[in-house]
Amino acid sequence: MRLSEHRYRTISSIRGPLLFVEQVFAARMGEVVRIACPGGETAEGEILKIDGDTALIQVFGETRGLGLDADVAFTDAIRQAPLSADVIGRVFNGSFIPIDGAPMFVPEQWAPITGAPINPTARARPEEFIETGLTAIDALNTLVKGQKLPIFSSAGLPAKEMTAAIVRNARLAGGGAFVVVFVALGLPHHEYAFYMQVLAGMEGDFTAFINRAGEPVMERLLAPRFGLAVAEHLAFARGMDVLVVITDMTNYCDALREVSTAREELPGRRGYPGYMYSDLASLYERAGRIRGMPGSVTMLPVVTMPEDDITHPIPDLTGYITEGQIVLSRELHQKGVFPPVDVLPSLSRLMQRGIGSGRTRQDHRRIADLLYKQYAKGRDLRRLEAIVGREGMMGSDRLMLDFADAFERELIHQGAARRDINASLDGGIALLGRFPAEAP
């Protein structure tokens, strides 16, 4: 037992995964608690709320069979992440317990899962290109080292398959030490099986944290923080470029709302806690680069918009904090386009810093601008086509309609195939060359 550890047998009530412990004289928010369970096992928990001398504890695990006389040890420690280069190639659950069949590695150091905020004056500008293998992102909404670029999806769209493609195919175009940290939250069984199959087919350039739907809700809040603690270690202690992919932030925010309800806090918009903005910012703002250091943390969070509503609090607040968005389209999905990225509302605000000579290609900006220009014309003319019909339109207008169709069918759509940036840009040049429009 630690010298600072305090033990109590003063549980007043047990409500599902929640314990109420009375007569507590030394406790702090977020403190790790250990509970002696029947059969000699030990469960961990975390203090959610302190009201006078009563502490509300969320248990990470099953409380069935637990009695009011159970021994509860307050450790006087906040949750920390074990860190080592040996995390690469491993799969853990939301409590950082291995689920890949291999033993736990020996940590080289421990660090708080909340991380340390990056000094704003020490931040380097996000730049340099990260290749995802998807033309809709690489050529038209380029991802840049240190950026936070969310993917806005809707129920029924293939965000799962798109996320898997990025996890498999992302890399540095120019080579270098690169790793993907994948965090999956609240997975039903079929999604869990899908992602585990994807990870099984990958080489050792990833680390994964998988939280299943039936596991404790607090693990849904811990898993992204464990993943980011690992990412920061690999980036800033080992000089690696790290891409953090988190799916799905909607499950994270629902877990946040559930914990807030357990704390009996006043709800905000749609029942979500009023501090959800700052909580999301505490995750998203951990992405970035530090001046004078070689590593970087880049983030691609996936957000499933409830009721396809981009003004819902989760995508709305995410948009305030991040630097652009990739928007998936139900219409394109119905046409069989994969990935169904609607490039017109999509935006990468830092794209200009990651493209051009020495990064992608000198003609990248010009090709992207021309593709956007022609596609926007074609999309706009579809409304006229619905009114007057194709036969009632001018020949040049029909040509723009054909361009929009070919753009979606040949450039945005790529199925399971991976495209590097040169193939994406060359495909754009070829498409523009087939129509009587300005060419790069």
Image: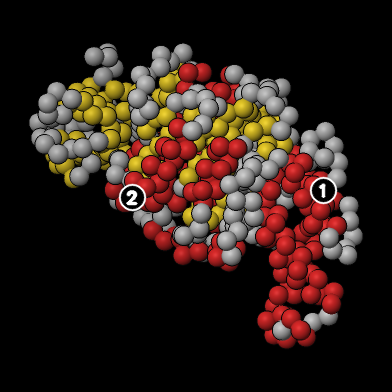
Vertical position of residue 139 compared to residue 1: above or below: below
Give coordinates of residue 157: x percent, y percent.
Answer: 50, 58
User: In the rendered image, which quarter is residue 107 located in?
Assistant: top left
Residue 178 shown left or right of residue 62 in the figure? right
Residue 117 in sight from this viewpoint: no
The amino acid on which the numbered mark 2 sits, given as a three-letter code, is Glu
Q: Nearer the viewer, residue 93 or 232?
A: 93
Q: Nearer the viewer, residue 397 or 4?
A: 397
Give coordinates of residue 15: x percent, y percent.
Answer: 18, 45
Q: Residues within 10 Å of mark 1 (few under 14, many from 20)?
A: some
- Give the SS element for disc 1: helix
Residue 440 shown left or right of residue 292 in the figure? right
Query: Which label belongs to residue 203?
Result: none
Vertical position of residue 409 compared to residue 195: above or below: below
* Camera-side mark, 1 or 2: 1
Residue 133 shown left or right of residue 437 in the figure? left
Please give the name of the residue rendered at 34% of the width and 46% of the height, measured from the top-left corner: 189
Residue 201 in sight from this viewpoint: yes
Q: Residues within 10 Å of mark 2 (few under 14, many from 20)?
A: some
Nearer the N terminus, badge 1 or badge 2?
2
Give coordinates of residue 113: x percent, y percent.
Answer: 45, 29
Give coordinates of residue 16: x percent, y percent.
Answer: 20, 44
Please give the name of the residue rendered at 79% of the width and 82% of the height, measured from the top-left corner: 393
Q: Which residue is mark 1?
A: 365
The amino acid on which the numbered mark 1 sits, given as a three-letter code, is Arg
Please give the name of the residue rendered at 64% of the width and 42% of the height, measured from the top-left corner: 418
Q: Which residue is mark 2?
A: 258
User: In the rendered image, which quarter is residue 404 located in?
Assistant: bottom right
Please give the name of the residue rendered at 67% of the width and 27% of the height, measured from the top-left corner: 290
